[in-house]
Image: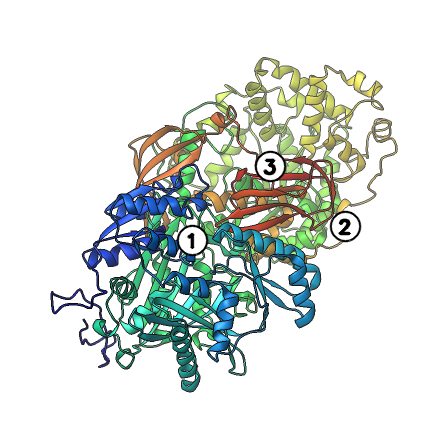
Amino acid sequence: MFQLCRPRGGRALLGLRLLRGPPGPARPVSYRPLRKVLVANRGEIAIRVFRACTELGIRTVAVYSEQDTGQMHRQKADEAYLVGRGLPPVQAYLHIPDIIRVAQENEVDAIHPGYGFLSERADFAQACLDAGVRFVGPPPDVVRKMGDKVEARAIAIAAGVPVVPGTPSPVSALAEAQEFAARVGFPVILKAAHGGGGRGMRVVRAPQELEENFSRATSEALAAFGNGDLFVEKFIERPRHIEVQILGDSHGNVVHLFERDCSVQRRHQKVVEIAPAARLPPELRARLADDAVRLARQVGYENAGTVEFLVDQNGDYFFIEVNSRLQVEHTVTEEITDVDLVHAQLQVAAGRSLPELGLQQERIRVNGCAIQCRVTTEDPARGFQPDTGRIEVFRSGEGMGIRLDGASAFQGALISPHYDSLLVKVVAHGPDQPAAAAKMSRALAEFRIRGVKTNIPFLQNVLAHPQFLAGAADTQFIDENPELFHLRPGQNRAQKLLHYLGHVMVNGPSTPLPVKAKAALVEPNPPAVPMGEWGATFDVAMRFLHECPWERLRELRRLVPNIPFQMLLRGANAVGYTNYPDNVVHRFCEVAVANGMDIFRVFDALNYMPNLLLGVEAAGNAGAVVEAALSYTGDVANPSRTKYSLQYYLGLARELVTAGTHVLCIKDMAGLLTPAAARLLVGALREQHPEVPLHVHTHDTAGAGVASIMGAVVACISLERVFEYSEYWEAARGLYAAFDCTATMKSGNADVYENEIPGGQYTNLHFQAHAMGLGHKFKEVKKAYAEANKLLGDLIKVTPSSKVVGDLAQFMVQNRLSREEVEARADELSFPVSVVEFLQGHIGVPPGGFPEPFRSRVLKDLPRVEGRPGASLPPLDFEALGRELGARHGAPPSPEELLSAALYPKVYDEFRTFTSTFGPVACLGTRLFLEGPTIAEEFEVELERGKTLHIKALALGDLNAAGQREVFFELNGQLRSILVRDTQALKEMHVHPKADKGAKGQVGAPMPGEVVEVRVKEGATVAKGDPLCVLSAMKMETVVTAPVGGKVTKLHVRPGLSLEGDDLIAVIE
């Protein structure tokens, strides 16, 4: 039956829609209605057939493997039965006796094979007929002829259809393939003789590639189709892949439903399909369709099938194969012809003729254009490696002109490595290709899929490409357009933040807490004018707060546009703890100014003038205000302390003012500037430089600094504002209770005048001592600090010189060494690296030079740095670093990211890894960041202006067999759950180790999959590029090769082992 209708787009064309007709006159004798149909397949094609059966009033039966008990196709059928018990996942769907048994036991009338698996197996079609069950497809003999690509070639030749040069029969030996290739020349293509879909297909361009590709193609074909035979053809360069949909019946009728363009493909796997083919001359379109129908009639074809051709650049075409089944891309043909192909398949299998169904050639018309995109769980950024796991979030794109065919696309679905990576087929229909592409792009942009990687960003690039929109894509389109892989990363901020919160709820804070103290529950209200400073904690922002220091600076500047910002610059060390090339320091200052910085407080841990002058020059050239600091130690008011005298500091000040500093600073890190010394030093500086502003910076370790500083504060601002800020900071300290120095320090410590420990270091050492259970020995640490300082020649103690003294002090306490013992055994002790590097001259030259003979005895024959350490460093190649970062992270870095990586390469990589996993944690409040939410707590997180998340923590699940806990949230009113690894529990469980991405010799699994072959043994020597093992996932095999040459010291895999992505395969030294 057929009906006339006005198709989509409003065009007055004849559309055909298959209907289940009412009872009428008697059918031909061959007509036997179907009452129950089994689908010998899984996933979306099984569901597609079930839907058609339901529309026709036919009862449905599903089969499923042991691994597919949770799959949707099992639930969509009226009945479902297990097949292939104990067999591997794919083999279960290839077990013909089990499938026939289920059909017979459950009174099935017909079996629909879907596509893939048994769909092109003549023995399966024959087994159905032998069991008295109809096969929804061509007769077994036709399946055999068309499935055997060599015999299909012979039939095509007999029908007068042009073919590609190829082997006359299937090839099972490498020598046969080598002989054919030597005769016709390279390139050649290997194809599975008993199946399609890109399985067992390899292009070979050189003789040395043939053996490996032949082995891989044979293995894939055997796994996918149960037969590893191949045939070999001459490979045609840059063709279009055009296929014609045909439909035949048992009465001798054959029609075509026009063509599809399947040229957009990767590794012979179709990615995007279009119907009809654009820019195809009418005469060529007619010849292709006529040849397809003639070929079908030649063999007596019944049911649905596809005749595939390659069309070269000259418009010549060649037959390549017949797919004697329904194709994945049948949907686009249905959309443009308004013919339900699965309805037609079932009706033809029941015995109806095509004219009965209203399917006469002259009535089949094309209406508009349809595009199908296969959304797969593959990662385009990693060579389309299949991804597996649990879908945490699924939201599809819908609307006018959009059709979705899927099966596993729902929240909570588990994507396994055992089957095809197809998640959902998206079909868009419009009046022409650009309109259909626009609808498709819009629909794909609406998708939200979290938990597994997908190819959606790649598909969006394809749809936006001018060559695709012009209908000019050929089979080399993807290979020749690398810009398709410039993927716009998805933000996925909400789900990443849930992962962070869940991680903290399960495993505790991501930032180490010095003491166990809970943060206050109440957030403080900030005063009217927020203030901030930047620089000294540059690496801390990335390392512990997991936020970008540059973004924080820009945000502060946006909030405080009219108040100058000041930062600390460690002279030639910039904001790091080592020496950098001069161009790095200069570039850093330029970019900091561009991001909103105004004043640079430049200092050097040793007051080493060459280091200071470089910082002054870099900040000044960047256009900033320069505040040069005198790092203070000693006591200028004590005549017996002669090394750091008043004249010493006045001399430093003169040099700095001459160098062009705008402001002078007294930087008193240890709080050693007594009131008497302050009056003396400040007075002398004011007298010597009356026009230069002075700034005093001190620490109140001893408890004597507040009174002297308070007078200056009160003189500058009103007490009312002081009280306002005081109230804010009092509340803020409650949030950071775990970091508050009063947790261990209950009062000021005047002994700082003796040990001279800088304030920041004093509290850190105090925390460390308490954390290690040595709080009662802190007095010994302080005494050792004073002794270590004397050993090193009485240093100015500011980062990083203070770390040198502290490391030496702890070394002395740990080894129970006195100052005298260290001096006596200097040539035999293994000193901390920081001490050795200081003595070598890596951070500059201290006032008065290095302590001798201590230095010489420690260094012995080690090299020494002469002059300013950074002066001998070659300029950093920012362009090369940018290329390296772009390759590593998938996008070119910003100027700010480039500098972060230049200053702290390891910290920056760890920061990028953290943020790619957990998102913008800077959006979280302090307590939530440190401790996570409590169960049943509701809170809001503002991602950006106008985008706010409403989150409620619901529950924390029990530990599962994989060492994970499920954490439940409510996000914007929708239930979300995530799986979090319990790090403490994992220590007690055996879990496969992960490869360290930063270690070149550690080889990780590039994708989840099963190890099918191991090519090396422990102790073997391998060269870069040598094969290590073969992984199989989604029925595709990948050879894992050695990234470096060396010796395989440890092998972590064996055949049959299932791996997750990045699981450690081998260690190469």
Under mark 3, the amino acid is: Arg
Category of crowding for the residue at label 1, using alpha-carbon neighbours closer than 10 angstroms: few (below 14), some (14–19), many (at least 20): many
Residue drawn 72% across and 19% down? 812
Category of crowding for the residue at label 3, using alpha-carbon neighbours closer than 10 angstroms: few (below 14), some (14–19), many (at least 20): some
Instruction: Report the front residue among 233 and 499.
Output: 233
Residue drawn 47% across and 25% down? 985
In the orientation shown, which residue stands out farthest toward the top? 776
In terms of sequence position, does the residue under pointer 3 or pointer 1 come before the other?
Answer: 1
Q: Which residue, given by chain and number where applicable, does mark 1 sit on?
A: 117
| Element class at badge 2 | loop
In the image, is 124 to the left or to the right of 30?
right
Q: Nearer the viewer, mark 2 or mark 3?
A: 3
For residue 53, what is the image quadrant?
A: bottom left
Place of residue 197 in the rendered image (x, y in percent of width and height, measured from the top left)? 47, 60
In the orientation shown, which residue stands out farthest toward the bottom? 283
Query: Please, is residue 776 above or below residue 264 in the view?
Result: above
Q: Quadrant of the C terminus?
A: top right
Place of residue 454 in the rendered image (x, y in percent of width and height, measured from the top left)? 44, 54
Q: Which residue, given by chain and number where applicable, does mark 2 sit on?
A: 873
Q: Which residue, given by chain and number where applicable, does mark 3 sit on?
A: 1054
Q: Does any portion of residue 203 appear in the rendered image?
A: yes
